[in-house]
Amino acid sequence: MRDVTTAHPVQDLDVQPTPLALLLLGRDADPRSERGVECPGDLPSPSDPDLVERARAAKEKLGEKVFVLGHHYQRDEVIQFADVTGDSFKLARDAAARPEAEYIVFCGVHFMAESADILTTDDQKVVLPDLAAGCSMADMATAEQVAECWDVLTEAGVAEQVVPVSYMNSSADIKAFTGRHGGTICTSSNAKRALEWAFDQGEPSAVKVLFLPDQHLGRNTAVRDMGMSLEDCVLYNPHKPNGGLTAEELRDAKMILWRGHCSVHGRFSVESVNDVRARIPGVNVLVHPECKHEVVAAADYVGSTEYIIKALEAAPAGSKWAIGTELNLVRRLANRFAAEDKEIVFLDKTVCFCSTMNRIDLPHLVWTLESLAEGKLVNRIVVDPETEKYAKLALERMLALP
């Protein structure tokens, strides 16, 4: 990794640099972090005019040995080579349903590839074209932080009442923690069912949910979909002593929300909603539940990525839509439905791609496919057996949800 220098060396500071500071300075690495640290090998030049043909040739040479998964937020140049497209969990299940594929090339981010490795067979090899394709949300909850949180809950005398529910957008370590402590995983599509299941694990009035790592999905599901109040929710901040909460606040809460968020969906604001309504009379505002609570409250429709796609498919010709989710998908949908006279715009005026998802570009994909075609396994994602055991347990609880 390229060393990062500053005008004032770290050694001149009066304080010792924290592990996070060293990570930001490029001076250290956390192997359990979603942030990759390197991508070894030589990439084709982005200006190579033959990249599309090279990707096609390598994929054809691999044949049924390779299965390429493309997340909805991927750029068009990559998505054209995907055998299936979808959200993170759908893609992981699709991979598990193709045991004949030796290589699973996951065009997404790190936690998605981990989930695919957990759900596929030991003979299958999951590959991430760029190891630096991580997820800022998943990075907001580390195994050490969550273990410390559980200690705080124990000291407050509430741990035995707490059922963890972790969003799919979390690391394998967090999924394993969830499995060990009797919890389940959820997606943005089934978060309500997951919470209902969690509250059924004991006396509903006594059970509490620790929701990881996206505070907005947890809050929106609890308040909008399940009728709880905002006062039923408290925010646990892993960077403050005891999460910034008193024992009484923890005892009174029904939802203990982790202080995490999606860097893309967190950008949308009520001002964005008001502005698009003023610019486009009659527009329907449709947002992802990872958006802030006030944005969700101001929208006309709220739903997962798959919900957004289906809503636009069913929308009448001539309708107008402002979509609050990742820009690659919004732009693709706008092009797809233009012939049906459906006007689809991005909710915010600011360009807002998922920066880590966009690290999977055509040069990385070509390098990956050509390496595999030459018999060289690159960028394999492997979850250790102990972590896999408990993470899979949490995922299986989700699969068993009614």
Image: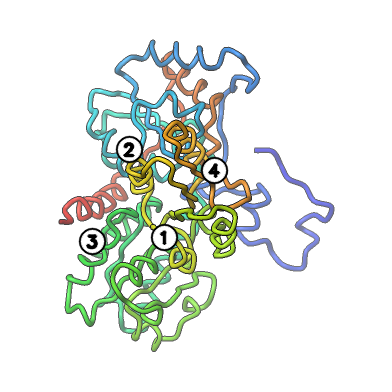
| Residue on which the image places disc 1 | 300
In the image, what residue type sits under mark 1?
Asp
* Distance between the alpha carbons at the discs numbered 3 and 2: 21 Å
Q: Position of residue 30 (x, y in %)?
A: 53, 50
| Residue on which the image places disc 4 | 356
* Distance between the alpha carbons at the discs numbered 1 and 3: 22 Å
Mark nearer the N terminus (2 vs 4)? 2
**Quarter residue 180 falls in:** bottom left
* Distance between the alpha carbons at the discs numbered 4 and 3: 29 Å
In the image, what residue type sits under mark 4?
Thr
* Distance between the alpha carbons at the discs numbered 1 and 2: 28 Å
Mark nearer the N terminus (1 vs 4)? 1
* Number of residues whose C-alpha sits closer than 10 Å to that of mark 2, classed few (under 14), some (14–19) or many (20 or more): many
| Residue on which the image places disc 3 | 193
Q: Nearer the viewer, mark 1 or mark 2?
A: 1
Q: Position of residue 264 (x, y in %)?
A: 53, 52
At horizontal 33% and vertical 55% (from top left) the residue drawn is: 175
